Amino acid sequence: MKAFPTYVTSTALAAALLLAGATAFAATAYRWVDAQGVVHIQDQPHEGAEEIELGSPPTYHADPANTSYAARATAAKQNDAEVKFTCSVTQPLNDAVLFENVSITISVSVQPGLRGSDHLNVSYDGMTLPAASPGATSFTVSPVDRGEHTVVATLLDANSKTLCTTAPVTFYVRQPGLRAR
């Protein structure tokens, strides 16, 4: 019997396994070589064929915990929990003195940035300011009274969990007195 290169036998075996996987898997296959030296593997007996016992086909079982929607959502929450947010009031500056302002704009910086479901609560002298729009980082106070004022901002997620809080910023507003008019 003539010896055939290994790749011919391997290729024929791979083809037979693919064919077997595509149809009902046969536990027995038959290997034979024709007059031209081509190796054949099939599920039907042939004159002079060698019987080959095939094992169970290889299977793949995905880990349900890694592919399910719930697992991906849990992983996303864990990633969110790992994100460290920092918040700061960027306007007005701490200890700033503002003269004759009718209104002021309070601006808050959030790093790495607001996500779609996050929102800021800004407290001006202990009272929460309404946001101009969802995801707003600037808030306007009008009218502004003279004197000392304090601003604190808190970043909250969709479940109202605190992600970061700014240090209190104190600023002063000077308005002309009644005698100055």
Image (tube, rainbow, N blue to C red):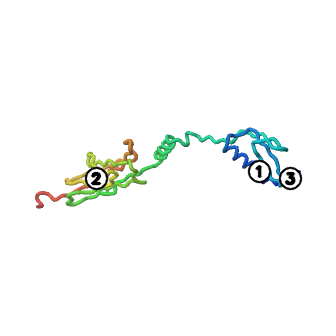
Are discs 2 and 3 less than 8 Å apart at CB?
no
Q: Quarter of the image holding residue 94?
A: bottom left
Q: Amino acid at mark 3?
A: Ala
Near-viewer residue (99 or 75): 75
- Indicate the position of residue 83 as horizontal and vertical percent values: 46, 49
- Indicate the position of residue 3 as horizontal and vertical percent values: 86, 53
Q: Amino acid at mark 2?
A: Ala
Which residue is at a point 34% across and 54% down the rendered structure image? 108
Which residue is at a point 60% across and 41% down the rendered structure image? 62
Residue tagged by mark 3? 3
* Location of the C terminus (image quadrant): bottom left
Marks 1 and 2, the one that precedes in the sequence: 1
Residue tagged by mark 2? 132
Image position of 78 with respect to 172: above or below = above
Residue tagged by mark 1? 10
- Please give left or right for residue 119 compared with residue 42 in the image: left
Near-viewer residue (178 or 117): 117
Marks 2 and 3, the one that precedes in the sequence: 3
- Please give left or right for residue 117 compared with residue 172 in the image: right
Marks 1 and 3, the one that precedes in the sequence: 3
- Indicate the position of residue 36 as horizontal and vertical percent values: 83, 55
Mark 1 to mark 3: distance in Å?
Answer: 13 Å
- Secondary structure of the residue carrying tag 2 is loop
Which mark lies nearer to you, 1 or 2?
1
